[in-house]
Image (cartoon, coloured by chain):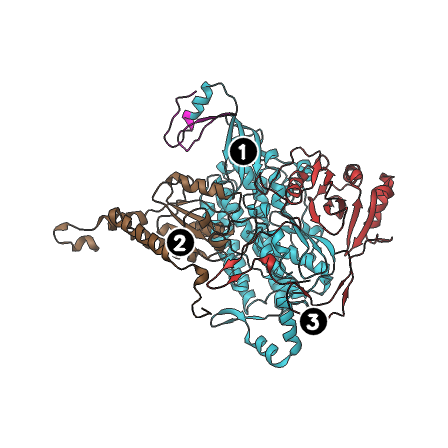
């Protein structure tokens, strides 16, 4: 049948990171943070039999942030809602991840004005940005699968600290977007 | 004052008294604490993030035990400044903004806005009949998809999880039709001032008739689950009562008004887009409660299917007619076609504007960069959206951009009646009352 | 908006000089429409005059444009006329308050519009009240139509019109401590330039505009 039948002497060796990543990515519970139109597509992913999020075991959207791992910010975040967003994020217990679903959550989208926060990464750290207006349920599923891969590869212990240092150094030395002119003028 | 302590949610003293944080499971210990302290009132915040409040709605409740003494509604958590943003876009670009206000019924937003712009332009009688019939078809399909979300989420909030799956399954069928016609499932920007952006694909009326047959059968599932169901009726009968006097003074329209007994439907009373040529009934209930509104919405689904069938018949007869107004200085120029890389400008149109017709090129260029100009004036046009009367008040100063556009959203008025419906009842009934109003916070806050 | 505008294709602030300047766009007229108004508007005007003898003093303009009737009212008479419209002329529903800001009309910059609907007679009219930015007070109509409560709060929030007699006039859409009234014409859109690789796109309020 599966892996379990092919093991000689019935012992499987793995890494702590591999097992922890595997377990964490298979049991993600999203927090309900549907704000606007993207929330409807998120609901379609969650409950329409056509796009079925319970294939990952994620159909149980947790209303309480204490029991949620993933916050899918679905919709435009207004100035009034931003402190609420931050409070819900703070109430989530680690490990936690954020998908910013849709153009409005990723960058303010088409609403470049006084009322909308231009990108939810001004308020919370984002792991996956998902463009679309609104993104189809299949696109959200793709983002979730990519997030699962990300979660499965998370490093732990001293490896984690090394990775964090490396990422921070790369970010500090990175070229700002406005200077990446490429083949345009120097 | 208390021994109530929890590492994650403890109490703290403020100028107004003690504030408790409750996270679930400890409600009993909280209530017994309060009982000892002789405080009668508890103020509970059902905050903007809540699974049952239909979006980012904040309800501040004053409770005496389980009875609600006061409900205060807090909105504005989804305010997007769409109305101000439109003042910097031209008349056609504004459609894409307007469509995202009430995101469950985008076609209605677009239709109200486009009817208002056409009234200002004075071309209401020049809109081709095929365009009007397509508008009616899309509106009724949207009514079905919107009512499905209302029924599904309303049932889910009251504890029934089965209807949610059936409702979203039916909604997916309608969204497939939308995708085939417009290219998008939601927020389509399909209805433009002057007509619709492109014609129906070939063979669409056959698919629409199949859709009607399928949906008629599917609606039975939800009906069998909920109509006459004792638990459902116990949770919805007599809840959220708002009679006719309350509705008229609060400006409440839509299924809530019709559940109070008044057969007020703008499609019949002040028809637009040719609605006077369709046969359908206005559904009313006389109980003015949540159950009545639920029955009204379920029955409106069948009426929408009737209209869709009649629209499909009309479309077959009007095959080949234009879908945009004839005046080339207003009609949106681009003809879209499905190419190898998706939907884009049709090559025939490009061949025409680049090769044969100078006027087409000029019109295309000027309409896309600058837009058409609308004579000065103001107008208020209303359509019957699934939630009530959706009114567009558009003011023009004669230029290429709207001077001011204000939408009178039905959810804005309907949500005001939450206090009237819920005060004096139980906490659990607030959810039912709000679900029966079916507010869409994008429309409330714009 | 109050003067004739010349030039058909024109742009302000950039060097685009396409088009020609021979066309004149007439400004919106500022007079009243003359009788007969057509349709049910004459009946409405007659009924109102019969029920409210001070009609000529309170109603400054009657405009019938594109099939819609607008009554311009002095703000001091607003509540009386509203009660008469509701009770005698049976306009039971008010569809809310819509605010408009005309910065060019000195003395009457802030305008509040009330679309009214009569369910019994199936008629629609509109009331328009103007007030100056320096004295932005308009009497509240919450006692006449309770549904105007939130609409007046929204108009206060967005335009700064203070409705006297409102039971609780606070901000409703913006956060409670927000400064300014966003939908006024002198309030900036607040967009930011969008940054790409090597270039930026200006915010919507800074782009080329065509009159």
Magenta segment main secondary structure: loop
Letter of the cyan chain = B
Q: Which residue does the numbered mark 2 point to in the structure image?
A: A128
Chain of the residue under the numbered disc 2 shown in the image: A
Please name whichever residue, B107 or C136, is drawn nearer the observer in this view of the structure.
Answer: C136
Viewer-nearest of discs 1 and 2? 2
Image location of residue B165, percent across then percent down = 45, 49
Pointer 2 local density, CA inside 10 Å: few below 14, some 14–19, many at least 20:
some
What label sits on residue B288 in the rendered view?
none
**What residue lies at 56% left-to-right and 45% top-to-bottom?**
B441
What label sits on residue B60 in the rendered view?
1
- The kind of secondary structure element at disc 3 is loop
Q: Which residue does the numbered mark 3 point to in the structure image?
A: C19
Please name whichever residue, B95 or B325, is drawn nearer the observer in this view of the structure.
Answer: B95
Q: Which residues are magenta?
A: B1-29
Viewer-nearest of discs 2 and 3? 3
Query: Which residue appears farthest toward the front when viewing the image?
Result: A186
Letter of the red chain = C
Chain of the residue under the numbered disc 3 shown in the image: C
């Amino acid at each position: 049948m599966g892996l379990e039948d092919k093991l000689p002497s019935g012992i499987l060796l793995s890494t702590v990171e591999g097992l922890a990543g595997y377990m964490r990515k298979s049991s993600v519970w999203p927090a309900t943070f549907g704000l606007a139109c993207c929330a409807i597509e998120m609901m379609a992913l969650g409950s329409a039999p056509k796009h079925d999020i319970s294939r990952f075991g994620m159909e149980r959207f947790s209303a309480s942030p204490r029991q949620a791992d993933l916050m899918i910010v679905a919709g435009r975040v207004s100035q009034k809602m931003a402190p609420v967003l931050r409070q819900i994020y703070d109430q989530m217990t680690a490990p936690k991840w954020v998908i910013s679903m849709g153009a409005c959550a990723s960058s303010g989208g088409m609403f470049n004005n006084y009322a909308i926060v231009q990108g939810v990464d001004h308020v919370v750290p984002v792991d996956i940005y998902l463009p679309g207006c609104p993104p189809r349920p299949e696109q959200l599923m793709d983002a979730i699968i990519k997030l699962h891969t990300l979660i499965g590869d998370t490093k732990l212990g001293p490896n984690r600290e090394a990775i964090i240092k490396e990422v921070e150094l790369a970010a500090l030395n990175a070229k700002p977007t406005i200077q990446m002119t490429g083949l345009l003028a120097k | 004052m208390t021994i109530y302590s929890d590492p994650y949610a403890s109490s703290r003293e403020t100028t107004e008294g003690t504030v408790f944080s409750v996270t679930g499971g400890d409600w009993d210990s909280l209530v017994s604490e309060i009982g000892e302290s002789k405080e009668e009132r508890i103020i509970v915040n059902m905050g903007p993030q809540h699974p049952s409040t239909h979006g980012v709605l904040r309800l501040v409740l004053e409770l005496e035990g389980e009875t609600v003494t006061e409900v205060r509604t807090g909105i504005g958590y989804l305010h997007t400044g769409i109305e101000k943003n439109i003042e910097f876009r031209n008349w056609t670009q504004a459609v894409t903004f307007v469509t995202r206000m009430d995101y469950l019924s985008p076609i209605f937003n677009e239709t109200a806005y486009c009817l208002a712009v056409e009234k200002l332009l004075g071309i209401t009688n020049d809109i081709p009949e095929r365009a009007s019939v397509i508008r009616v078809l899309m509106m009724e399909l949207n009514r079905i998809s919107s009512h499905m979300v209302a029924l599904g989420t309303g049932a889910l909030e009251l504890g029934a999880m089965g209807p949610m799956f059936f409702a979203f399954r039916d909604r997916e069928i309608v969204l497939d039709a939308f995708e085939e016609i417009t290219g998008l499932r939601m927020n389509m920007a399909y209805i433009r001032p002057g007509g619709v952006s492109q014609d129906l694909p070939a063979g669409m009326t056959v698919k629409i008739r199949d859709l009607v047959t399928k949906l008629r059968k599917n609606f039975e599932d939800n009906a069998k689950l909920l109509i006459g169901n004792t638990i459902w009726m116990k949770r919805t009968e007599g809840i959220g009562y708002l009679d006719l006097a309350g509705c008229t003074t609060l400006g409440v329209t839509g299924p809530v008004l019709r559940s109070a007994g008044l057969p007020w439907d703008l499609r019949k009373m002040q028809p637009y887009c040719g609605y006077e040529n369709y046969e359908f009934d206005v559904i009313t209930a006389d109980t003015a409660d949540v159950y009545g509104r639920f029955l009204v919405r379920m029955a409106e689904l069948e009426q929408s299917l009737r209209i869709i069938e009649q629209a499909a018949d009309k479309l077959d007869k009007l095959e080949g007619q234009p879908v945009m107004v004839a005046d080339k200085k207003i009609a949106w120029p681009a003809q879209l076609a499905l190419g190898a890389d998706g939907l884009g400008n049709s090559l025939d149109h490009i061949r025409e504007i680049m090769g044969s017709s100078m006027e087409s090129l000029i019109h295309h260029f000027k309409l896309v960069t600058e837009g058409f100009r609308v004579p000065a004036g103001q107008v208020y046009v209303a359509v019957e959206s699934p939630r009530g009367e959706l009114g567009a008040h558009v003011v023009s100063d004669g230029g290429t951009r709207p001077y001011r556009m204000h939408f009178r959203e039905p959810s804005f008025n309907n949500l005001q009646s939450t206090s009237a419906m819920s005060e004096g009842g139980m906490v659990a009934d607030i959810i039912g009352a709000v679900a029966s109003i079916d507010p869409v916070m994008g429309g409330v806050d714009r | 908006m109050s003067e004739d505008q010349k030039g058909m294709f024109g742009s302000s602030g950039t060097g685009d000089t396409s088009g020609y300047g021979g066309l004149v766009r007439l400004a919106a007229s500022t007079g009243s429409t003359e009788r007969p108004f057509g349709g049910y508007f004459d009946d409405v005007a007659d009924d109102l005059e019969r029920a409210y003898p001070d009609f000529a003093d309170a109603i400054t303009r009657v405009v019938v444009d594109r099939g819609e009737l607008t009554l311009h009212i002095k703000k001091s008479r607003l509540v009386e006329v509203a009660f008469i419209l509701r009770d005698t002329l049976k306009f039971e529903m008010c569809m809310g308050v819509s605010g408009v800001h005309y910065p060019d009309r000195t003395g009457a910059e802030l305008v509040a519009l009330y679309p009214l609907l009569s369910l019994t007679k199936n008629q629609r009219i509109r009331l328009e009240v103007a007030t100056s930015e320096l004295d932005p007070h308009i009497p509240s109509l919450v006692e006449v139509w309770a549904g105007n409560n939130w609409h007046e709060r929204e108009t206060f929030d967005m335009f700064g019109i203070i409705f006297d007699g409102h039971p609780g006039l606070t901000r409703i859409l913006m956060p409670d401590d927000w400064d300014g009234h966003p939908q006024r014409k002198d309030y900036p859109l607040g967009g930011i330039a969008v940054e790409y690789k090597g270039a930026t796109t200006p915010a919507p309020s800074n782009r080329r505009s065509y009159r």
